[in-house]
Image (cartoon, coloured by chain):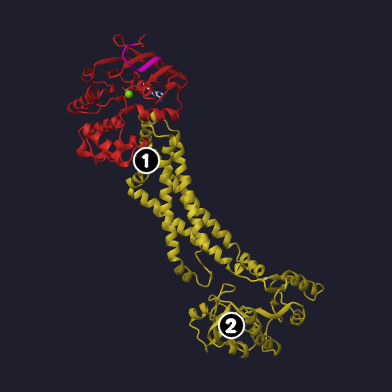
Amino acid sequence: MPIHLIFRNLVRHKLRTALTVGSLAIAVFLLCVLRALVVSLDAGVRNSTSDRLIVQSAVSLFVNLPASYVGKLKAVEGVDSVARLQWFGGYYQDPSSFFAQFGVDPEKFLGMYPEFKIVEGSRERFLTERTACIIGRQTADRYGFKVGDTVPIIGTIFQRLDGLPWEFQVAGIYELESIVWDETTIFFPFDYLEESLESGAASGPPGSGVIYIHLAEGVNPVNIAAEVDGLFENGPQRVQTTTEAEFNAQFVSMVGNIPFFVTTIGGGVLAAILLAVINTMLLAGREQRHDMGVLKALGFSDWAVFGVMLGQGVLLCVVGGALGIGLAQLSSPEIAKLLGTMFPGFEMTSEILTNACTLSLGIGLLSGALPAAATRKLLAVDAFRRGA
Amino acid sequence: MSSTAATRTVVELNGVTRAYSRGGERIVVLDALDFAIEEGERVAIMGPSGSGKTTLLNLIGGLDKPELGSVRVAGEELTELTPPELARWRAGNVGIVFQGFNLIPVLSAQENVELPLLLAPLSRSERRAHAAHALELVGLADRASHRPGQLSGGQEQRVAIARAIVSDPTLILADEPTGDLDRASADSVMALLARLNEELGKTVIIVTHDPLAAASAQRSVHLDKGRWKSDGEGA
Ligand SMILES: Nc1ncnc2c1ncn2[C@@H]1O[C@H](COP(=O)(O)OP(=O)(O)OP(=O)(O)O)[C@@H](O)[C@H]1O
Ligand SMILES: [Mg+2]
């Protein structure tokens, strides 16, 4: 097979080849980024451990669990510790600057989440002071919160009767060792919220939205989940107990169909580039009809001629794909920074890059195979006829 | 009939018919044609446009098959070969200079001439040496690195002839090798084919419109509407 013809024919039309390679590179880059977005949405699910269970109302995540459940859950054999968690739903300065706030049982919560590292300030203060809070690294950086600052949060679900914002003192800033949560959330003591409601200083629904259970070592989470569900079978509030992974998965599906949406865009990008490359290759096939006829007349086999055409498609796409993949890999730290809070754990995994390689090769094979199949069947005598 | 001549017969066609159907109508391009060429002959095939000259040459070169009749070339019955066998046969036995289009534009003269050698068990340096020798024979050693676009029409045809002889075939087929050339270039191309015939003993078949060119052949035959014209049946 005259292999040099593959390269020579591609460089013959420098501009066309450059444009095709360029659009391929951009498409492959985009596909890698889109794929990484979908993967990052699943990060919370992937990094979950099975020694944490989450108890929520069987009716809805927005129905609170009674305070009395905490004691009953602690009594279940195999349960190591229990932490309440309440969605606060307030905002800082204006509703558009969104980050989540949760009231939690500080010691129990941090105890079952060793992934949280307090990198600045004092863990001790958070555990002991009533209005202390810890803030995720990204939110702290975004608003310039420092240890010792007071963060005013305007309540929506929970409102103070004096009309003032709630105030939390920054006891520490946390970072995550793995993406089990995100680095944007503020956690404050649940007790502060509960006391404010009980004393009448604030209004809002009592109880806690969910209760986290940390299991003792070697306990089967499925059995405990079933036992807990059975415990409250007859009320007052039926519950649904899930593993952390299942719990996080329901949020991924709650942000609606972002994975589906992103995948659809990716499919569109893929289809567009495939058609563009096929078009280029069909054009090349027509231009080289005569040349391929000459090769056949000289005695080259049908498959050798097939290979020359196929090779052009493959080489085109391998180069374009490699550029796109390189770009995706080089730029992914910057993209992760830009996306920040929306997609924690954005990462260009080697699996994504491998898939992109396979995809580029696939586009190359397909786009090359179309003109190659036609040239394989071409007869030299037909290739030489004028106007053919 | 002539199949048992004393000298070796290189080309022997018997009752060859080739027809195309166009819009339901059957057009007979070659009509029960007989043709024989002895080894070392230089034959010119003449005839008006559309008389079937290229079709005939394609049959002899193993690029096409007849509907009826037998095509025996260089000891092989071509009608019995499969397409891959025909391709291999072509690579080893004929050198063809096509009508009009010949060279691959993205390859240099040297690379164009080397192409047929890729099908032979030769090393890279052997291929180079053979191709350089062939280019020297056609007087274009100094144009080896030129692309076809950088050559004149006559030079292109001479490169095509170099490519036709590089694998040392017994038979050279040339379809209007002087078609678009001026007198001087045409003469040099015809002289080259004559030399290949006389000095290297190649059997040469030339299709041409040009009576002067035909006159330089040892024998010329005339095709008209797929049949031999009075003077010229090929044996
Ligand atoms: N593939 C084909 N399909 C239909 N008709 C064809 C085909 N190839 C050749 N013909 C017809 O066969 C006839 C002979 O063609 P051929 O090319 O052999 O002529 P020619 O003598 O070489 O003419 P020219 O001097 O113009 O090259 C023409 O009428 C042509 O239209
Ligand atoms: Mg012709």
The quarter of the rendering in which ligand 1 is drawn is top left
Q: Chain A is drawn in which colour?
A: yellow
Lateral position of residue A72 relative to residue B90, left or right: right
Callout 1: chain: A
**How packed is label 2: few (under 14 Cα within 10 Å), some, or many (20 or more)?**
many
Residue B37, quarter of the rendered image: top left
Percent x, y of residue A116: 58, 79
Determine the residue positioned at 40% across, 19% down. Answer: B71
A230, above or below B174, in the image: below
The N terminus of chain A: image quadrant = top left
Residue type at numbered disc 2: Ile
Provide the major secondary structure of the magenta segment: strand
**How packed is label 1: few (under 14 Cα within 10 Å), some, or many (20 or more)?**
some
Residue B17, quarter of the rendered image: top left
Q: Name the residue under label 2.
A: A154
Residue B6 located within the stretch drawn in magenta: yes
Q: Name the residue under label 1.
A: A2
Q: Which residues are drawn in magenta?
A: B5-14
Determine the residue positioned at 47% across, 59% down. Answer: A30
